[in-house]
């Protein structure tokens, strides 16, 4: 899910460098797993949220350090009062950059009361 406007914002992604966040829909105050590959080995990687208006704010407990293979994996805690909405998580080590879309929501998610073949996810505030 790219930010409003259809294009991820921030630095262009470096080929063979990847960034993923699971789940991509995050409840404010919850943790998500962040993984990155293809970064400079043993270098610090800075993570930022790029909001739809183009502004940036530090993400997670940045920076992290890529291992000897250029990989990192950690749990990212979103702040309880995080601004809700679409955003892009961007990671850079000054040489390599990767981005991935995410959405922050402020309510608990749960399935609706009835389960049918076309059940939907209901978000309650």
Image (spheres, helix red, strand yellow):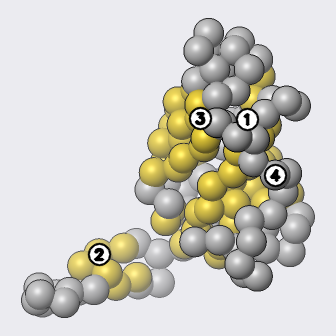
The answer to whether mark 3 and mark 2 are in CB contact below 8 A is no
Q: Earlier in the sequence, mark 3 or mark 2?
A: 3
Tell me the mark number nearer the camera, choosing from 1 and 3. 3
Specify the farthest residue to the front: 15
Residue 62 shows which numbered tag?
Answer: 1
How many C-alpha atoms fall within 10 Å of the one at disc 4: few (<14), some, or many (≥20)? few
Mark 2 element type = strand
- 23 in relation to 125, above or below: above
Mark 4 element type = loop
Q: Quadrant of residue 7?
A: bottom right
Gap in angstroms between the C-alphas marked 4 and 1 = 19 Å
Residue 91 shows which numbered tag?
Answer: none
Gap in angstroms between the C-alphas marked 4 and 3 = 15 Å
Tell me the mark number nearer the camera, choosing from 2 and 4. 4
Tell me the mark number nearer the camera, choosing from 3 and 2. 3
Residue 12 shows which numbered tag?
Answer: 4
Q: Quadrant of residue 5?
A: bottom right
Q: Residue at x 61, y 41 (%)?
A: 18
Residue 110 shows which numbered tag?
Answer: 2
Q: Earlier in the sequence, mark 2 or mark 4?
A: 4
Tell me the mark number nearer the camera, choosing from 4 and 3. 4
Q: Earlier in the sequence, mark 4 or mark 3?
A: 4
Which of 39/47 is in front? Answer: 39
The answer to whether mark 2 and mark 4 are in CB contact below 8 A is no
Specify the quadrant that holds the N terminus: bottom right
Which of 84/33 is in front? Answer: 33
Q: Earlier in the sequence, mark 1 or mark 3?
A: 3
Residue 36 shows which numbered tag?
Answer: 3
Mark 3 element type = strand
Q: Earlier in the sequence, mark 4 or mark 1?
A: 4
């Amino acid at each position: 899910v790219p930010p409003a406007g259809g294009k991820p914002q921030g630095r262009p992604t470096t080929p063979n460098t990847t960034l993923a966040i699971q789940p991509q829909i995050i409840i404010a105050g919850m943790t998500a797993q962040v993984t990155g590959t293809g970064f400079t080995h043993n270098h610090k990687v800075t993570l930022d949220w790029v909001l739809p208006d183009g502004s940036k704010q530090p993400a997670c407990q940045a920076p992290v350090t890529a291992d000897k293979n250029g990989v990192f994996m950690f749990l990212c805690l979103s702040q309880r009062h995080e601004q809700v909405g679409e955003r892009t998580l961007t990671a850079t080590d000054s040489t390599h950059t990767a981005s991935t879309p995410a959405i922050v929501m402020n309510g608990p998610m749960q399935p609706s009361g009835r389960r049918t073949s076309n059940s939907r996810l209901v978000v309650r505030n």
